[in-house]
Amino acid sequence: AQHVQPGGWTDPESQQADEKRSNTSDKEKALRTSSSSSQRNSKTSVASSLGPPPCKLGFESSEVFFSPTSGSVAIPVTRSQGAPGTTASCRYETRAVSAQAGRDFTTTQGQLFFEDGVDQLSVKIDVLRNSRRTAQSQPHRFRLCLLDPSSGAEFDFGKDDDEGAQQTEDGGACCEIVLDAGGAFDP
């Protein structure tokens, strides 16, 4: 840009200052354009490198109530999310809380394999007859814990207001089984 002063003469100092501002302005524009383009590309590449969301493994509820004095209880384990065509797996095991393994329930452990398209499996746990459980006694409790999810899977702990799994000290997910011989949970 030229600065023409009254009388038709050109002010070289103003013209040089304008050219510097113009060059700086052009450089800043180019830098801003390059930077925002780079940020867009970076966001796109991060999003595409993340891949599909992981499979979520968990429980429908954080507690299961079991009233009979003996029998078995089947605890559903659910799978959600994940990409079509993928599988997921994890270990499971029972852990005593106030109930005793071998006296109130049979120790159970194993591996769950969710094939493509399978969204629920069950773990069967035998509950043993125990004379300690009476109508007057407090409910006895034990846990079914999910551990060591396969690559591409993680445990679903739900949201604060959900009934999802509880988190164990070692990062697993668990559901608490509450045994009651006195029928306190019967309708």
Image: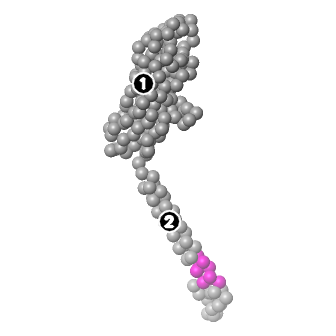
* Outermost residue to the front: 102
Question: Which residue is drawn at the image coordinates 54% and 22% (left, top)?
Answer: 96
| Residue 164 seen by the camera | no
Is residue 178 located in the magenta-colored stretch of the structure? no
Say which label, 2 or 1, has the lower sequence index: 2
Q: Name the residue carrying label 1.
A: 75
Quadrant of the snapshot with the N terminus = bottom right
Asked which secondary structure carries label 2, the reply is helix
Question: Which residue is drawn at the image coordinates 53% and 73% (left, top)?
Answer: 30
**Residues rendered magenta in the picture:** 17-25
Cα distance in 3D space between marks 2 and 1 = 50 Å
Asked which quadrant contains residue 83, the reply is top left
Number of marks drawn: 2
Is residue 23 located in the magenta-colored stretch of the structure? yes
Q: Position of residue 137 (x, y in %)?
A: 57, 9
Above or below, 25 against 135 in this view is: below
| Residue 25 seen by the camera | yes
Q: Position of residue 66 (x, y in %)?
A: 46, 15
65 relative position to 21: left or right: left
Question: Which residue is drawn at the image coordinates 63% and 93% (left, top)?
Answer: 9
Which amino acid is tagged 2? Ser
Asked which secondary structure carries label 1, the reply is strand
Q: Name the residue carrying label 2.
A: 38
